[in-house]
Amino acid sequence: MPLPSPHPCSAEANLQAAVALLLELQRQGLRRLVLCPGSRSAPLALAAGLLAERGLDLYCGVDERSAAFLALGLSRGDGIPAALVTTSGTAVANLLPAVVEADFGAIPLLVLSADRPSRLKECGANQTVNQETFLMASCRRVLHGDSRGLAAMEAGALEDLAREAWATALASPWGPVHCNLPFEEPLHASAESISRLQAELGSLVLEIACGETGVAEPEAPPPLLDFDRPGVVVAGPWRGSAQALPAFAEALNALQERTGWPVFADVLSGLRGWSGLECIHSYDLLLADGHRLPPSPQLLRLGPVPASRRLQGWIQQCDGPQLLLSEGDPRNLDALGSATARSSMGLTSWCQQLSEGQRQGGPSSENLRWRGLWLAAEQHVQRRLDDDLAGSCPSEPALARCLSRLLPTDWGVMLASSSPVRDWESFSAADAPCHRTYGFRGASGIDGTLSIAAGLACSTGPILLMSGDLALLHDANGWLWQQQLQARDARLTVVMVDNGGGGIFEQLPIRPALDFERLFAMPQSLDHQRWAAGYGIPSRAVVGLEALPEALSWAQEHTLSLLVLRTDRQADAQLRQALRRTMVQLATS
C-alpha cells in the first residue's frame, strides 16, 4: 500500500513556522532555550539561532540527558520555564529522568521535540518511534503540532499552541509540558531564506508578557489549630518561586511571634539562617531511636514532608490536628496519611484569612515552656557537634559543618541526593548564614547532578555543589557546560567527596550482604582529577579541613572547578551512628 502524499511545504515554510512558535513563547516570557543537535529539529535550531539575536539566551549541548537537567536547573532557579529542543527518536527518551524530577519537584519546563509527520509512523521509517508517549506519564500535558507537519499550521494556531504550553507549565502545580512537533521535509532552509527572516525579525517590536500564569486557589479550610496551645511548624522543601520565598518567611516569622512554636526547617526549605526565625536544625538527631522528646499536640506542615525518616515517624505519633499547606500544589502531598486537613492556598494567604483575634497577641506561657524545651535541646546538640567534629580527620559530617560556615553569603549551595543532602540536614551549623539551598528530591535521582548545578549557576548566581563521586560520574558530560558558564560569567565550584563508592549504602543495614563492595558500593578505579582534566576542568585535592578555606578561595576564581576530599566511608558511617547515640543521650539527659 503506498504511503500518503506528503503535505506540500518548503524549508522556508518550516523555518517560518518554527520562528512563529518560538517567537510567541518569547512573548509569553521565555528567556532561555537549551538546544541539542539534530537534523529533523533543524528548523527549530535555526529559529532559536535567529531569536538569540533578539534576546533569547541560547545554550547548546550534545547530550540530551545532560541538557534536560541543565534546563531543569535553569527553570528551578527563578521559576521561569526554560525550553529544551531535541531531534526525534531516542533523543526524546533521554529526557525522561529530568522530566520525572520536574513533575515530582513542581518545576516548570518546556520540551519541544521534532518528529516525523504521521504518514511516516508505523511503517519502518528511520528514526521514527512513538516518542509522543515517552514522557506522557510525567507531563502536565502533551501537546501536538499538526500531524502533517508544523508548516501546515496557520500562524494563529501556532501562537495558540505556544500560549497553551506556557500557561500549562505555570498552572498549579507547576511542571513539564511536552510539545511534539512534526516536520515534513525539506528541513534545511537556504541562506537567502534565513537572511529574509532575519531582516523581518529585525524590524519587529517584541512585547514580553508580564506576570505569572496560574489557577484560582481553593478555599481555605477552617484554621483548626489553637495558637494558644503548644504546636510545631514542620517546613518541608520549598517548592514555590524564589520571588515568593521572602513573603513566605515573613508570614512564618509573624506566626512564630504570635505562637512561639518551634520551626523544624528542612535543609531545602530555604529558611535556615533566615533573620528573626528560630529554627530547630537538629531534629533528625533529636528524634533518633530512643528519643524521649514528646510528640506535638498539633502540627502545621508546610509543603512536602521532609525526607528524615525519624521526623516522619515522629509526625505519625502526633495524634492531634495536622494542617498541611502547600504553595499552590493541589496534589496530595501527605505521604504519611496523617494530615487532618489540606489546602494548596499557601502560608501567606492562609495567614491573611485568619481573624484579628487569632493574629493578635503573643505566645502563651505554656507555649513558651514548650519552645524552651526544644531550644535547650537544640543548643546542647549544636555545642556538642562543634566539640565532636572539631579537628577531626576529614569526614563527611565535619565537611558539611565546615562548609556551611565557610561559604560566602552570596553563594548558593546545591546538595546532591544520597549522603550530601542528609549530612547537610543533620550536621550543618545552626549559626551558619542563610544560603540559597537546592536539592532535587522530588524523585531523588542522581542522574543529572552536575548539569542541574550548572543550570542553577547560570540562572541564580554562584553555586557550590557538594556531591559524592558516583553522582558526578553519573553525569560526566556535565563538565561540558564549562563553555556555557564562561559565556555568562557564571561560577560553579564542585566539592566532591571521594569515598570509593556509594557511601549511602554504608548507612543501611546491608553491610553483611554477600560481596557488599561489588553489589552495592561499586567503587571505580578512577583518578578524579585526571578525569576532570580531560574536560579541561582545573582541580585540587584537599588534604584536610584546615586546607578548605584556601582551596575554596582558589576555586571561586575559576568558572568551573573541582575540589576533591578523600574520606573513609566505613568510618564515616560509624561516626554518624556514634553521633546519633550521643545526641539522643544529651537531649534527654
Image: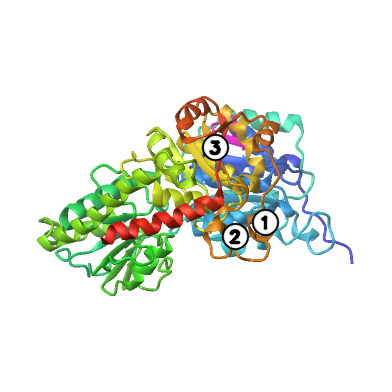
Disc nearest the viewer among 1 and 3: 3
Does the stretch in magenta take in 533? no
Measured in 3D between alpha carbons, the distance from the residue under mark 3 to the one under mark 2, in whole angstroms, is 36 Å
Is residue 327 at least partly visible in the picture?
A: no
Q: Residue 54 location in percent, x, y?
A: 56, 31
Q: Which residue position holds label 3?
A: 494
Q: Which residue is disc 2 drawn over?
A: 142
> Identity of the amino acid at label 2?
Val
**Relative to residue 314, is residue 458 drawn left or right?**
right
Amino acid type of the residue that numbered disc 3 sits on in the rendered structure: Val
Does residue 186 appear left or right of residue 133 in this picture?
right
- Residue situated in front as seen by the camera: 390 or 199: 390
Q: Is residue 407 left or right of residue 139?
A: left
N-terminal of the pair, mark 1 or mark 3, is 1
Q: Position of residue 534 (x, y in %)?
A: 70, 32
- Where disc 3 sits, the SS reads strand
Question: Is 59 within the magenta?
Answer: yes
Query: Which region shows up in magenta?
Result: 52-60
